């Protein structure tokens, strides 16, 4: 295989992970593992806690990436390494956007201000508007519905 093929595998995996994450968020986190995810929907930073049960998902999602990297390194199936690399890169992107930028768990990226970054914030805010596992919207991270590119007052008026 060529370097271009490995780059393609990595990029395809990163793109695919957005849909894996959307599905896991909707059907696992808001499904049978709600008890892990529930505290993420409750305001608790005022209580002085930094970690939440929801952070356990980091371990769950890191496991396939690590497994693929090891498999690709230790077997003749080297291309699997690049699947693991794509999963890991998506995980880093998710961490930087979700935990750092959106939830401000670290004091980085506060100056981001673009049409896309505002849409991400609006979509995530709409998701967190509910503190229950039912009735939430916008389960993805990077793919944002068109309505969130408008000001919140505009799309709320359209749905009223």
Image (tube, rainbow, N blue to C red):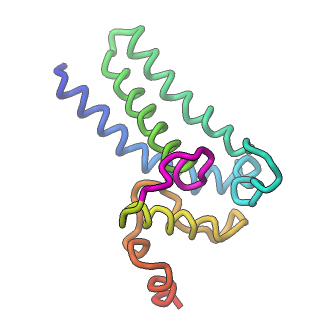
Q: Residue at x 40, y 77 (%)?
A: 150
Q: Nearer the viewer, residue 34 or 94?
A: 94
Q: Position of residue 65 (x, y in %)?
A: 48, 28
Q: Is residue 63 magenta?
A: no
Apparent side of residue 31 relative to residue 82 in the rendered image (left or right): right
Q: Is residue 105 magenta?
A: yes
Picture quarter with the N terminus: top left
Q: Residue at x 46, y 62 (%)?
A: 120
The span picked out in magenta is 100-112
Apparent side of residue 15 relative to residue 129 in the rendered image (left or right): left
Number of numbered discs overlaid on the protein picture:
0
Q: Main secondary structure of the magenta part?
A: loop
Q: Residue at x 44, y 23 (%)?
A: 68
Outermost residue to the right? 47
Q: Nearer the viewer, residue 59 or 117?
A: 117
The image shows residue 23, relative to residue 66, as above or below, that is below
Q: Position of residue 88 (x, y in %)?
A: 45, 31
Apparent side of residue 4 relative to residue 105 in the rendered image (left or right): left
Q: Nearer the viewer, residue 58 or 19?
A: 58
Q: Residue at x 52, y 51 (%)?
A: 101
Q: Position of residue 84 (x, y in %)?
A: 42, 27
Q: Position of residue 94 (x, y in %)?
A: 49, 44
The part of the image, by quadrant, that contains residue 57 is: top right
Q: Nearer the viewer, residue 51 or 69?
A: 51
């Amino acid at each position: 295989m060529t370097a271009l093929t490995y780059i393609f595998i990595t990029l395809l995996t990163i793109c695919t992970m957005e849909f894996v994450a959307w599905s896991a968020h909707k059907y696992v986190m808001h499904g049978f593992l709600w008890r892990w995810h529930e505290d993420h929907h409750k305001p608790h930073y005022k209580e002085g806690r930094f970690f939440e049960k929801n952070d356990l998902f980091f371990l769950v999602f890191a496991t396939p990436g690590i497994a693929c990297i090891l498999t690709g390194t230790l077997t003749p199936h080297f291309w699997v390494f690049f699947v693991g690399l794509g999963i890991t890169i998506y995980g880093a992107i998710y961490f930087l956007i979700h935990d750092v930028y959106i939830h401000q768990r670290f004091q980085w990226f506060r100056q981001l201000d673009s049409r896309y970054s505002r849409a991400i914030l609006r979509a995530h805010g709409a998701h967190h508007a509910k503190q229950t596992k039912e009735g939430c919207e916008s389960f993805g991270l990077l793919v944002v519905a068109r309505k969130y590119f408008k000001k919140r007052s505009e799309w709320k008026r359209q749905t009223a």
